[in-house]
Image: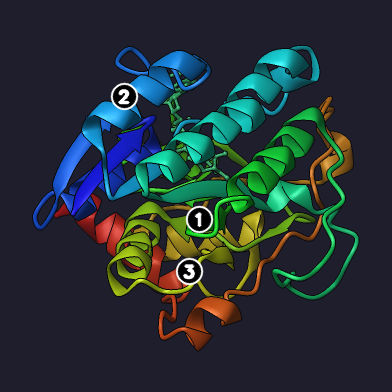
Amino acid sequence: MKVLITGAAGQIGGAIAREFEPCHRVIGLGQRELDITDHASVTRVVQSERPDVVINCAAYNDVEAAEDEALTALQVNAFAVGSLARAAREAGAALVHFSTDFVFDGETTRPYVETDPPNPRSVYAASKLLGDWFAAELPRAYVLRVESLFGPCGAKGGRKSSVDRIIAAIQAGAEARVFVDRVVSPSYAVDVAATTRALVERGVEGGLYHCVNSGFCTWLDLGLEIVRLLGAPCTLVPVRTADVPLRASRPRFSALSNAKLARVGLAMPSWQDALARCLAARVG
Ligand SMILES: NC(=O)c1ccc[n+]([C@@H]2O[C@H](COP(=O)([O-])OP(=O)(O)OC[C@H]3O[C@@H](n4cnc5c(N)ncnc54)[C@H](OP(=O)(O)O)[C@@H]3O)[C@@H](O)[C@H]2O)c1
């Protein structure tokens, strides 16, 4: 299978490339090789490469800055996905696109399922939801919602995810501020990549899937599990959402149910299991 990855230098992009490379022909393009907002380049590259699947790992992910840069967020997270979906359709390729828990408002007490109505509360969230809709116009599109990504080795170019920052702080014996009132279903990039590959290879029916590790936790629970696994002194500082002024609204309860994936034979490991493997890979 020929696999074209956009945003290949990002956290998921790197994990996806490593997952597919052993058995497939991978063309991994970073932003410098292919700016997905350049419609003509997207069309030209997809037409000339004629991949079997396009995996879009590119995104504008700065949730706070998006409040001021709505147009850029929309261009990368929404309209560019429309270009990729059109190009994939014309080349007869499938499309994989990644979405977010932020499309929900978080005003619930049970994990969201794929049929729950979204209600984005920030510019970033609205731009991502539009991207989901553009991708879904393609029958062979997998829209995979992930959240609170971590791993595989803390390598994310120069940037680090929130989970990676907490791990690094605990390892350094430094304070790590963690929310006690935000609930998430963390996603290990390695597991997301393996599931993506299985979906594509098995030709599972396209559609929207919540692709997160099983279970959910507060950020404090997550921090405590890292402390336990590392056997490190606890340097966690519990904070409440109201104590941290943020411009963009975040969902308070954004656990996602991955039962739909389990129904197609792709049960995801628990977040605790994923965290243990991630930490073992770092020290090993
Ligand atoms: N990280 C999370 O916790 C999280 C949570 C929910 C959903 N997601 C979704 O998961 C997906 C992957 O996220 P990630 O954490 O792997 O993101 P990431 O590490 O920030 O990587 C995104 C990549 O996209 C590239 N990019 C930005 N604008 C581009 C453009 N116009 N053309 C081509 N490439 C461009 C970036 O390049 P530069 O580095 O050069 O800017 C970066 O390499 C995204 O769809 C994201 O919205 C992530």
Q: Assess mark 3: CB under 8 A from ligand 1?
A: no
Instruction: Point out the frontmost of discs 3 and 2.
Output: 2
Mark 1 belongs to which amino acid? Ala
Q: Residues within 10 Å of mark 1 (few under 14, many from 20)?
A: many
Q: Is residue 156 left or right of residue 161?
A: left
Question: How far apart are labels 3 and 1 at the CA level?
Answer: 26 Å
- Toward which corner of the image does residue 257 lie, by quadrant? bottom right
- Badge 2 is on which residue? 45
Give the distance between the C-alpha atoms of the residues marked 2 and 1, in whole angstroms.
Answer: 19 Å
Circle 2 Cα neighbour tier, 10 Å, few/some/many (<14 / 14–19 / ≥20): some
Where residue 83 sits: x, y (%)?
54, 29
Q: Residue at position x 79%, y 42% from top?
A: 250
Question: Which image quarter is the C terminus in?
Answer: bottom left
Marked residue nearer the N-terminal end (3 or 1): 1
Q: For residue 261, say whether it is visible.
A: yes
Q: Which mark is residue 271?
A: 3
**Residue at (82%, 55%) from the top-left corner?**
118
The reply to whether callout 2 and callout 1 are in contact (CB within 8 Å) is: no
- 202, 284: nearer the viewer: 202
Is 73 rendered above or below residue 250?
A: above
Using residue 91 as the reference point, say whether residue 114 is left or right of it: right
Residue 22 drawn at (x, y percent): 9, 54
Label of residue 83 in the image: none
- The answer to which of marks 3 and 2 sits earlier in the sequence is 2
| Secondary structure of residue under mark 2 | helix
Tell me which amino acid carries mark 2.
Answer: Val
Q: Which residue is mark 1?
A: 141
What amino acid type is highlighted by mark number 3?
Answer: Trp
